[in-house]
């Protein structure tokens, strides 16, 4: 069972890149590995893209750059969801993170049991 994590992002000065980096680190530490991440970037510069580049060889990330001038933040979430291809979608905002390395595994176990 594949889990897609929809993660809309924006610059979020001054800690947006740090939040995203921390969150991707938590995703990387998950015991459940059939995960892909869809990052929809609503940032006017390449701050987010630089963090994605750092993790692109370690994590399965689909990166989409939204036009900052023609889209709004809610479009960004919808864009991330629209581009997911997993059996289930986990919404995760840029300043959110998974609690521990079993978070996705517990989610999958709950889905299977119910």
Image (cartoon, rainbow, N blue to C red):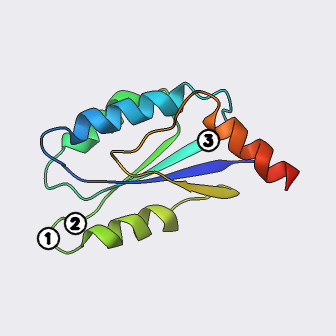
Badge 1 or badge 3: first in the primary sequence? 3
Q: Residue 1, how many percent across, how many down?
A: 76, 47
Q: Secondary structure at mark 3?
A: strand
Q: Secondary structure at mark 2?
A: loop
Horizontally, residue 29 falls left or right of residue 73, namely right
Residue to which mark 2 is pinned: 67
Q: CA distance from mark 1 to mark 2?
A: 5 Å
Quarter of the image with the C terminus is: bottom right
Q: Residue 86, how many percent across, how many down?
A: 65, 55
Residue to which mark 1 is pinned: 69
Residue at screen point 27% across, 42% down: 49
Badge 2 or badge 3: first in the primary sequence? 3
Which circle marks residue 35 in the picture? 3
- Let me know if residue 34 appears in the view: no
Residue at screen point 43% across, 34% down: 24
Nearer mark to the viewer, of 2 and 3: 3
Residue at screen point 78% across, 52% down: 111
Q: Are marks 1 and 2 in contact (CB under 8 Å)?
A: yes
């Amino acid at each position: 069972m594949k889990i897609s994590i929809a993660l809309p992002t924006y610059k979020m000065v001054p800690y947006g890149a740090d939040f995203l980096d921390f969150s991707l680190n938590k995703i990387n530490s998950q015991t459940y590995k059939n995960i892909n991440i869809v990052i929809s970037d609503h940032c006017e510069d390449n701050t987010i893209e630089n963090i994605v580049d750092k993790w692109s060889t370690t994590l399965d990330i689909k990166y989409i750059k939204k036009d900052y001038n023609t889209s709004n933040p809610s479009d960004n979430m919808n864009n991330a969801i629209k581009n997911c291809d997993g059996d289930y979608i986990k919404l995760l905002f840029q300043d959110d993170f998974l609690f521990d390395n079993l978070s996705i595994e517990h989610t999958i176990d709950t889905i299977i049991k119910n």
